[in-house]
Image (tube, grey):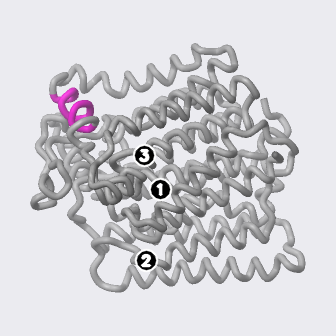
Amino acid sequence: MTRGRAVFLLLIAHVALDFAVALELGFYALVPLFYTVVACAVLLFVAAGPAASGSDATPSARVMACWLMALALGGLVSRPFMFVHGGGLAFLVTGWNLVLFAVGAALLVASFRSVPAGALWGRIVFGILAAATALRLLVPLASPEPPIDVFSMREGGAAALLEGRNPYQTRIHDPIPGGAEQYGYSVGNYAYMPVTLLPDVLAKRIAGDVRAASVVAELLACLCLVQVARRRLPGLWRSPAALLTAAPLLYSKGPYVTEMSWTEPLLLGALAVWWALAALGRERGAAVTFGLFLAFKQYLVFFALAFFGDALGRGRPLRVAVPAAVVLATVLPFLLWDLESFLAYPVRWMLTENLPFREDALSLAGLWFRSTGTAPPGFLAMAAGAVTVSFLLARWWRRGPVLSGREDVVLVGTAATLVAFLVGPQAFANYYYFLTNALVLVLVGAGLDAAPGDS
């Protein structure tokens, strides 16, 4: 398989995952589940395949036009928000997607003649980044206090730390009446990992809303893609494929993700910084940043295993020492502050009480429940992810990486995590948002091995 073919297949997976969330806002339905299964199958096919050959991994103008139009359609097929009242911002989001669709259509028409290469594409990317960021920043103004537990927890945790209180000892307001009966759990104390507090405290202090941190993280991810493309992939940067660098802010339900205050944009920003530093040869900074990335969320275990697998394959197992030390450094202050509250919430509550089966999950478990009336055991998710990552790492050690090793860490971690979500008791828009945009690092980085100076 050539690098170009691998990128084409991964673009299909990217669009399929985007549509899976766009159609029903990430909740269960048969058609979105079908798209998710297709994306998973394509990912596994690429990740389990032989090393990609060739040097040209830049998608054509025609492919990029269809990709952009598909993302714009995804933004139009369902409501853009959950809690925004009034039509002003929804009208802006609809108009934004219509403009993107028109740009894609114009590019498609032009591709049948000739599409010039040059600095124009970089200017278009920066225009998209500016407009999309401004649109995202309007979301907290239109939906200032969404009644969702994630927003309450992030806001409450940041406020507690700013006041000098331990967030894990702080009771968080549950904004969902009857949440325990409806979802199987209710909000207790702050339960996210400590590193999430760092950007949230800054955003709360500067902007008054923790969601500003999520918007900045998405912009940061895009700027990392831009920096690598400009320095390492001038051919891509001067072609319509430069649009890939804006993909995190082109995600069709991005404003919805911002409104709901999910933490996954923070994960994406950290992963993108690691990838960019590694691609630019700054290994020490990359190792530290990968540790910060892992410290954001409990479900990133398969990315950790992929990173460790890459280190073992290169005969450098000690490469994991720095990320592990960073993870420990982020949690140690709170372990010393109050061990019991830390174990009670980000460990026990988040990994047990917060994970009941939900029949609205966009997963095969939801389909199983509707077919049999019973919920499959929750441990199947971790088991399926573990089997997947073990299989893909064994293939990697036997045949070598599909792409560069760096991109394979993301590819293997994404594939195994997607399998776990697809089998698991809970899988919603925020999970698929992160995996969809993690794929963009692979799409842009697929041509890096052919770039001068790669090590």
Expressed as whole percent of the image width and height from the top left, the position of residue 339 reads 19, 22
Quadrant occupied by the C terminus: top right
Task: Answer with left or right where residue 234 lies relative to residue 225.
Answer: right
Whether residue 375 appears in magenta in the rendering, the answer is: no
Q: Which residue is mark 3?
A: 423
Q: Residues within 10 Å of mark 1 (few under 14, many from 20)?
A: many
Task: Return the residue at label 2.
Answer: 78
From the image, tell me which residue sits under label 1.
433
Which amino acid lies under the numbered mark 3 shown in the image of this protein? Answer: Val
Secondary structure of residue under mark 3? helix
Whether residues under marks 1 and 3 lie with C-beta atoms below 8 angstroms apart, the answer is no
Q: Secondary structure at mark 1?
A: helix
Residue type at the position of mark 1: Tyr
**Disc 2 from disc 1: Cα separation:** 16 Å
* Nearer mark to the viewer, of 3 and 2: 3
Residue 70 is drawn in which quadrant?
bottom right
Q: Quadrant of residue 114?
A: bottom right
Does residue 333 sit above or below 69 in this rendering?
above
The answer to which of marks 1 and 3 sits earlier in the sequence is 3
| Amino acid at pointer 2 | Ser
Q: Nearer the viewer, residue 80 or 168?
A: 80
Residue at image location 83% in from the left, 66% down from the top: 118
Q: Is residue 187 left or right of residue 257?
A: left
Number of numbered markers: 3
Q: Kindly report the secondary structure that dominates the magenta region of the rendered protein.
A: helix
Region in magenta: 341-350
Along the line of sight, which residue is nearer the eye, 348 or 420?
420
